[in-house]
């Protein structure tokens, strides 16, 4: 979903930091071999994730929703020298694809993959986080928030993707549209929860930045 004219959007991308070669390769192979390649964060949002992570310089990152590993690699760029990134995905078929690119990158030893249901895995990880990125199944966004908010360190950042859902959040919603209904509930939760402060950015499909107070 584009919120500005396409030509202006192209100008924005052209004047943003170049996409690393490894991520260009990952993108090409994703489009060649993997279903739903539009799920990739992509050049512009990937550089934004990288920049936010570099500003935070986190010791620990949690990513919920790995897909082919693009966003994990972007977030890993900001890790401290001995920092770790834990990423969770339910798709067993993507594990080897992710690992290949993680190991080619400089961050392979810092990235830990978890396969399965994130609502079951998160409670098993005895960790706190400086940065959390949620980009998974929308009906569970509220559940993910409640699982991680108390594990987010003071001043830590929660990033939530797809919060505008192609504009469906301001359209009439059908009763069976569970994803849109879940995002409406989630966006309201982020605005009202007193443990965080939140700004929703109209970038690509909507990206929310929340800071733990």
Image (cartoon, rainbow, N blue to C red):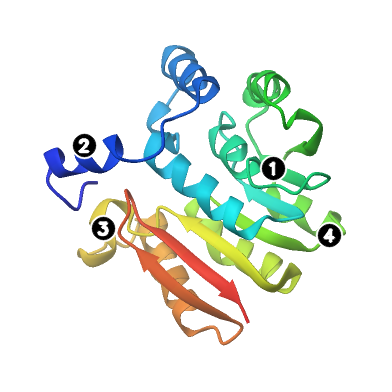
Residue 122 quadrant: bottom right
Counting from the top left corner in percent of width and height, residue 26 is at 52, 20
Residue density around tag 1, few if under 14, some if 14–19, many if 20 or more, within 10 Å: many
Residue at x-position 36% and y-position 59%:
180
Counting from the top left corner in percent of width and height, residue 1 is at 24, 46
Q: Secondary structure at mark 3?
A: helix
Residue at x-position 41% and y-position 27%:
37
Residue density around tag 4, few if under 14, some if 14–19, many if 20 or more, within 10 Å: some
Q: Secondary structure at mark 4?
A: loop
Figure check: 24 above or below 210:
above
Give whichever of discs 1 and 3 has the lower sequence position: 1
- Using the image, tell me which numbered label, if any, was put on residue 168: 3
Q: Whole-Å distance between the Cαs marked 2 and 4?
A: 40 Å
Give the labeled residue for mark 4.
127
Give the labeled residue for mark 2.
10
The answer to whether one can see residue 136 in this image is no
């Amino acid at each position: 979903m584009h919120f500005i004219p396409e030509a202006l959007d192209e100008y924005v991308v052209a004047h943003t930091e170049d996409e690393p070669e490894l991520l260009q390769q990952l993108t090409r192979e994703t489009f060649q071999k993997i279903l739903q390649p539009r799920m990739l964060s992509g050049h512009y949002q990937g550089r934004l994730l990288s920049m936010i992570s570099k500003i935070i310089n986190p010791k620990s990152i949690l990513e919920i929703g790995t897909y082919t590993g693009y966003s994990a690699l972007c977030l890993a760029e900001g890790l401290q020298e001995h920092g770790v990134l834990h990423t969770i995905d339910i798709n067993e078929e993507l594990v080897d694809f992710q690992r290949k690119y993680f190991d080619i990158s400089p961050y392979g030893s810092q990235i830990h993959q978890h396969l399965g249901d994130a609502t079951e895995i998160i409670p098993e990880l005895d960790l706190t986080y400086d940065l959390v990125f949620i980009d998974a199944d929308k009906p569970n966004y509220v559940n993910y928030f409640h699982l991680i908010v108390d594990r987010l360190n003071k001043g830590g950042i929660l990033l939530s993707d797809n919060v505008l859902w192609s504009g469906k959040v301001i359209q009439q919603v059908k009763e069976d549209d569970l994803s849109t209904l879940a995002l409406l509930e989630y966006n309201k939760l982020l605005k009202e929860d007193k443990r965080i402060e939140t700004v929703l950015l109209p970038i690509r499909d909507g990206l929310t930045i929340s800071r733990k107070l």
